[in-house]
Image (tube, rainbow, N blue to C red):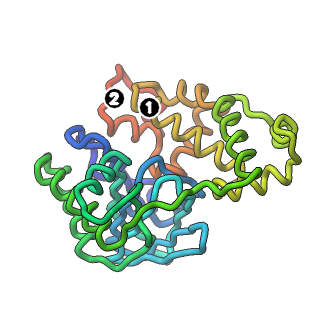
Amino acid sequence: MGRMESERGGSGEWARHWRYERLPGLDLLRAHYVRHTFPRHAHDGYVLAAVTGGIQEIGLPGGTDRAGPGSVVLINPEVPHSSRAGEPDGWAYATLYPSRGIVAEVAAELSGLRGTPGFTETTVADPETARLIRGVHRAAEEGNALAADGLLRTAVARALRRHGGPLPARMPRGAGAGTAARAREVLLERLGDPPSLDELAASLGTSPFALLRAFRAAYGMPPHTWLTDARVRRARRLLEAGTAPAEAAVAVGFTDQPHLNRHFTRIVGVPPGAYRRERGVSRGGRGPEDAA
């Protein structure tokens, strides 16, 4: 199952980002961060985080939330957000990243919830849901799949009942939204060799400033920030498939492995080598990723 806690830089920070093989569709993160700051990014699936110590500050499109012990942070897919410590001693939390499929399965069993399920609040005082989230971690770490799965579904159901509703349409309408969507497709196709903002705007028949404004409105971050996030997402899939970090770095368009290490660690919360090891990817001997 790997090391429970890996120290980071002697700062008292530690993190474990892993996947329990008997709970497909779920990633787990348990960590204590002090100096680490998560830049603006988004997730494919959902986030349910129980703050267990300190204060976490979450930067959201509508402002900044502060969450302390007993609080639960709920974030829907593709919602841009950042995170940092809200006090000098940092914050500790246990986080679940269930896939859209898991949340949809649970939502289908709940009466009165129509449409695509989501959370209508971001930071809530809900000690019972926080206890359930911590219980999922404890059961998974003990190798108790029956308990972990049951607690996971109970936690998701409780969060949806108390703080859930149908997700609103995320993409704004209008010509700007269409331009932003086309720009996103170009960036995905050219992940390793992206155009400049001027080139991208010219290819879409708009101005750089108009494109920048439309992209921010649609995705909550400028194109270059979104591109870095997309590269890290692609790198995660490659690492899970067994690709070495150095190869993944080149494949997604980073200059070299140190660039991947820096951006990956900032966004995911652990280095790519640790991320790969915790997913049980085997390899022969030690490589440079072991130092990440």
- Crowdedness of circle 2 by 10 Å Cα count: few (<14), some, many (20+)? some
- Between residues 255 and 27, which one lies in front from this camera angle? 27
Rendered residue at 27%/49% (across/down): 105
**Mark pair 2, 1: CA separation:** 8 Å
- Name the residue that disc number 1 marks: 239
Q: What kind of element bears circle 2?
A: loop
258 versus 108 height, above or below: above
- Between residues 14 and 276, which one lies in front from this camera angle? 276
Q: How many marks?
A: 2
Rendered residue at 15%/55% (across/down): 150
Q: Position of residue 229 (x, y in %)?
A: 59, 46
Rendered residue at 47%/66% (across/down): 34
Kind of residue at badge 1? Leu
Q: Is residue 292 left or right of residue 3?
A: right
Kind of residue at badge 2? Val
Q: Position of residue 123 (x, y in %)?
A: 43, 74
Identify the image quadrant of residue 242. Answer: top left
Give yes or no for contact between labels 2 and 1 (Cβ–Cβ under 8 Å).
yes
- Crowdedness of circle 1 by 10 Å Cα count: few (<14), some, many (20+)? many
Q: Position of residue 97 (x, y in %)?
A: 36, 52
- Name the residue that disc number 2 marks: 281
Identify the image quadrant of residue 231. Answer: top right
Q: Position of residue 135 (x, y in %)?
A: 19, 62
218 versus 20 height, above or below: below
80 versus 161 height, above or below: above
Q: What kind of element bears circle 1?
A: helix
Q: Sequence order check: which comes first, mark 2 or mark 1? A: 1
